[in-house]
Each structure stands twice: as structure tokens, then as C-alpha cells.
Image (tube, rainbow, N blue to C red):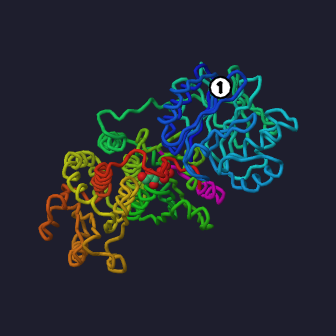
Amino acid sequence: MCGIIGVVAKSAVKSVLEGLGRLEYRGYDSSGISILSNNKIHTIKAEGKLTNLKHRLSRQPIDGDCCIGHTRWATHGRANVTNAHPHQYGQVSVVHNGIIENYLHLKQQLMQWGHHFNSSTDSEVIPHLINHYLAQPMTHEEAIEKAIGQLKGSYALGVLINGANNNLYAVKQGSPLVISQGSHGAYMASDAMALGADSGKIYYPEDNELITLNSNEIKCCSRSINKKIHFINNKKYVKAVSKGEHSSFMEKEIFEQVDLLKRLSVNNHTNEYSIINFKDLNKITIIACGTSYYAASVAKTWFEQYANILVEVDIASEYRYRSPVVIDNELTIFVSQSGETADTLAALRYAKSKKAQTLALVNAVNSSIAREANFTFEIYAGPEIGVASTKAFSCQLAIFYKMALEAAKQTAFIDKQELTQLALNFVQLPYIMEKVLQRCADIKLMAKKLCKYSNILFLGRGVLTAIAQEGALKLKEISYIHAEAYAAGELKHGPIALLDEQMPVLVIAPKNSLTEKLLSNIKEVQARNAPLFIIGDHSINEHINLRDDEFFELPAIPESILPIISVIPMQLLALYSAQTLGKNVDQPRNLAKSVTVE
Ligand code: F6R
């Protein structure tokens, strides 16, 4: 993943550090900057979070008008200072986001030419290659173009070269990069969100279009691409987001869901969805990763149940390598909070190459997925900073629910009365959600007990299996408790062998058409002495008699909106378990918010 930024402006270091703060969601294994000052490059790096780099800089202050910075999510090589970017060699310093697939071959060649390497990264070959070509001699632009011509894989690069000019070079292939012209300077970054308030105009460069940024101008300097840059207004400049009264961004984002859902339920976006001709569709395929994939799994049930449309759901990294069949009148929907997930983007490109109609459901409307799909719908969740996705999930579900109702209207599969009731359920949704959130102390009680275990099984039935999966994912990613989820009916086909006093089972058991069936599964768990936790309807506990720290009572919830409400206690359970165990819930280990590598 990694985040890169470059600034040509007065006090460039300050702007780069601020930008890195906004990019930390892409990785926080290490960070570093290079400054071009008095024709000389100075590089400072630190292991771990950005605060460590700031601390080093406060002891060794430095500034200049041309600076590049990087925040790392380790792929090749451990998270330490040597592997941190920028990678400086000879006259050149480089920040890189992406993966150089042929780096071993290039490294071998460079070593034969007498180059010595410090790090175990793939990225270090880039400054070596540029240096090699500069010595030919070549101009800066020629040397960079020649070097990138050797690279296989994906990259977005910021390059500084020692010398008389204060130029910053930027180029990308397959990885996100945005260039910006402000009134005080020129900027480049992995993401428009990283740019500060001075980023009035932005430009998304094409693959291999080499851009030079300096205090006078921003220009395309590729030999093969002769192009004038047309900037567009940066409408989506995101102001710094604060945690407010909350202990973490994740907590804030969980509690924000009520207001977001209130806004989504009164705004009449449904008209927007009528641009899709659902009536003539033969099939919908929904493709995503992680939490967004679980939102897609819920959406499948809604489209099938209310509009009778055939829906297939696929994991992006599987779809892209499976040569899937694309049929006539198939709509392929790509769900992504960040809009930059590499696997989802590659799957979108594959579907487009097969002439599928593509629709993006994203939170980041300036993202690559949003820009490349035929249609884009926004989920209106606002910036999500916590690495574990919460509010984006419920907003994805809310938009899918509205789309499913539009599809139901067009196909007339359910009668008007039922359709009206489904729409009314949606209006009630935020108020029911509020009631659940008001009882967060009860979930805290459950979390205190649950987090003592090292493993846990989550069970759900029907559409709530996806919510059990989402609950298990949330718990493992921020508390590091091993959690797996199953459709409750599958328990007896294998996982039941795991059950004993040390293997707790958490069941989502609201009142719905499958309650009776689920009760039998719960009895099977009890008979094996496995500790039982239930998030469910009060009627269930009449049969089971769990204690207050084992049973969380859900209010009465219309069946159609159950998935959007029942995920709330799951999110809270993960949050409070992780907090009780003293984990950093906003920046869990090994993860990054935007997964821009395969
Ligand atoms: C889990 C989580 C991830 C993302 C996944 C896809 O909390 O955040 O599983 O859902 O990496 O990300 P997007 O939706 O940005 O494509």
C-alpha cells in the first residue's frame, strides 16, 4: 500500500508531515522524508508510526522548498529504518508505492555493474537505476524514463535529484497518483485527501506520464506523451477530521452511523438509481474484498428476494484470475470504500475488457475505481479513518437497500404494499440503531468476558451469516482474537468438533423466519458445554437463560433491515474487546486502510 507525497513550496517539510498524517491510513510500519536543500538531498527516516519521525525531526530540524515523504506498509523486507523510504542512492532519492515484480533480476544486474544495496526492498532498485542512467550521461527526465522503462509491476513514484534545479518528478503505472496546483506551491500524493487546503486544482496523470513540479510550473515532460495538463477543481478537499469526544476514530465512526443513516433515509437518492435498467438485467455480479464483500453478500439476498434478479457475489482477487463468464445484460458492481483496492480495480478492468456494464459503489468519489467504472454511486459515509471499516459498511448496505427497492419497483416482483413497507422500514432504521447504540454498556460487559478467550466461533443464518462473518472479521483484525464465522446449519458438518469449554460460540439470533431453526443450533452448542454468547431477541433467552454478560437483547427490528442493525453490536463487541486488551483499535498491526497492492 504505502502513501507518498511531494511538495514544492515554502516550508515544504511541514506540509509533507501534515500530508503523511493524512496518508497514515495506507500504512504505518515506518515513515521518512527527503529534502532538497542547497542542491543537496537530506534523508531522515524512522521505524513505526509517524510520531517517531516527527520526534527525530524535532531533534534534527531541517527545511527546504522541495520535499518528498513516505509512510510504509511493508511488502518486501521487514518494517525497519533500513527498509523505510525514501531510498537514496548517489544523487537520487525516491519514494515508491506499489511493487516492482522484476526487482530481483534488476538488482542482480545492478550488482554486476558494481552497485551495493542496503535494504531488502524491491523499491531500492529504482534510485540505483536512475543513477546508472544519469551517469551515461542523460538528463534527469531521460534517466527517469529509461529507468521506469525497465520496471515491471506497479508504481507511483516521487523522485528528487541532486542538482541546480528544485524539481520534483512524479510518475505512475497502475498505482494511484494525484498532482495538484495550489496558489502557494505544487504537490503530488497518493490520494487527494492527503493534499492540504492549498490544493485548489488537481490532475490525475496517465500511466508513465512523467510530470515535473517546480515553483514556477507543473508540466508533462515525457518524451512519448506530449500533453498539456488540464487541472480540475478539487471539490473534495477533506478538512482534518478529529475524534471529537471519542477515544478512537473507530468509536466515533460507529456512533456516527445513526446520523449518516438518518441523512441517507431522508435524501431521495432513489431517483439516482433509476438510471440502471434493472428490468432488463439477466444477472448482477457484485465484486469486492473484505468488509465490502460482506456488504455484497447481504445485497445478493435483497436483490434476489425483492426483485427476483440473479446475483452472483465474488471476491475480487478470485474473480480477476478465474476467467469468469460475462453474459449479455449483466451488470457488474464493484464495492469499495477506498475506491483504490488493487484487486477490485483489476477486476473492474477485467470486466470492462469483457464489455460488461460496470458500476462502482464507493466512498471516495475521486478514486480510481470511481473514475474508471461506467457509473458511480457514492455511499456518503464521509472520511473513514479507523482502519477497521464500520460506517462504510452500513452506508454500503443502505445504498444497496435503496438500489434493491428501485429494482423491486422496476421488476414489480413484490406488490406495492410490500414495497411501501420496505421503504418505511428504512426510515425507521436509524432510530432503532440509536436504541442499540444507547445500550453500548451492555455490549462492553459481554466484551469483557469474551476477550478472555483466544478463539471464537460466530454463527448466523440466512442473510445474517454475512453479518456473523463481518463480526468475526472485525474482532480478529483489531483484538487479534482468532474468530471464524459459519452459517449455523453448517456447524454439524465439521466445526462442531471444535466445541468444548474453551471454544465460545457467539450467535446472532434475532426474531425472524429462521429463529426456530437457529434455536436447534444453539441447543447443539449448549449440549457440548461451549460457552455461549447471544445477540438476539428476548424470546430466545427464555429457552436458554443466559446471564447479562452473555446475552445482548436486540429490540424489535423489521426483518428486511436486520443486517444493518445487527452489525452494530458486532462492531461494538470488537471495539470493546480490543480496548479491554489494550490494543490500538485505529491502527491494528499489519493492516492498512487502502490495499493498493495485490
Ligand atoms: C475490514 C476492512 C477491509 C476492507 C477491504 C476492502 O475492516 O476494512 O476488509 O473492507 O480491504 O477495502 P475497500 O472497501 O476500500 O475496497
Magenta stretch?
A: 346-362
- Can residue 171 be seen in this snapshot? yes
Q: Is residue 96 magenta?
A: no
Q: Along the line of sight, which residue is nearer the eye, 217 or 371?
A: 217
Crowdedness near tag 1: few (<14), some (14–19) or many (≥20) residues, C-alpha within 10 Å: many
Q: Residue 286 in the image: state x and y as whole percent.
A: 49, 59
Would you place residue 189 above or below residue 398 in this image? above
Measuring from the top left, give residue 229's x and y in whole percent.
Answer: 70, 30
Quarter assignment of residue 473: bottom left
334 up-or-down from 5: above or below: below
Q: Which residue is mark 1?
A: 66
Residue 375 placed where, x, y %?
54, 47
Image quarter in which the C terminus is found: bottom right
Q: Is mark 1 within 8 Å of ligand 1?
A: no
131 lies left or right of 22: right
x 79%, y 40%: residue: 145
Residue 535: x and y in percent read 23, 60
Q: Residue at x 21, y 78 (%)?
A: 527
> Looking at the picture, which amino acid does disc 1 mark?
Cys
Between 305 and 321, the residue placed more toward the observer is 321
**On the picture, is 73 further left or further right than 115?**
left
- On the rendered structure, is 32 left or right of 524? right
Query: How many marks are shown on the rendered structure?
Result: 1
Q: Residue at x 49, y 48 (%)?
A: 592
Residue 420 in view (yes/no): no
Identify whether 532 is placed above or below 528.
above
Of 245 and 17, nearer the camera is 17
Mark 1, secondary structure of its residue? strand
